[in-house]
Amino acid sequence: MQVQKVNDNIDMIASFKGGKIKPLVFLCRGRRIKDFEVLSSWEIRYGEGKRVFFRISHENDTIYQVYLDTDCWRWTLETVVVKWL
């Protein structure tokens, strides 16, 4: 297993429905990531804002951890974990 700290801003298409945020598609280093499974989500509050984190599984071999910073409405790719097959 390889864990890579990234901390890059990313473009994300997400649904904001019924007070819930659902990531749908995002760009990672020029690659469009879609058809993924959200494994878990959680929030961390700081000051007036919060970060909403999502752990996303793609193609059963890569896990992305992304978050939305509600203070500036920016999405960030925090880490990538690649499983060895």
Image: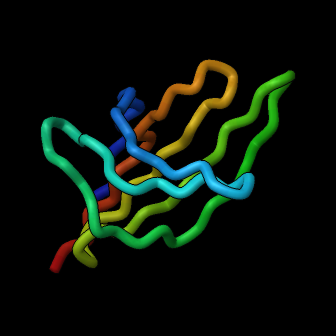
Residue 1 in view: no
Q: Is 82 or 23 nearer to us in this picture?
A: 23
Q: How many marks?
A: 0
Q: Is 34 or 39 nearer to us in this picture?
A: 34
Q: Is residue 9 above or below residue 25?
A: above
Q: Is 19 or 85 nearer to us in this picture?
A: 19
Q: Is residue 77 above or below residue 84?
A: above
- The picture places residue 27, in percent across and down from the top left corner, at 25, 41
- The picture places residue 79, in percent across and down from the top left corner, at 40, 46
- Please state if 12 lies on the left or on the right of 42 as rendered: left
Q: Residue at x 48, y 68 (%)?
A: 38
Kindly indicate the quadrant of the structure image that contains residue 9: top left
Q: Is residue 38 above or below residue 46?
A: below
Q: Is residue 30 above or below residue 37?
A: above
Q: Residue at x 67, y 38 (%)?
A: 51
Kindly indicate the quadrant of the structure image that contains residue 83: bottom left
- Please state if 64 lies on the left or on the right of 52 as rendered: left
Quarter of the figure with the C terminus: bottom left
Residue 25 in view: yes
Q: Residue furthest right?
A: 47
- The picture places residue 61, in percent across and down from the top left corner, at 24, 73
Quarter of the figure with the N terminus: bottom left
Q: Residue at x 57, y 26 (%)?
A: 73
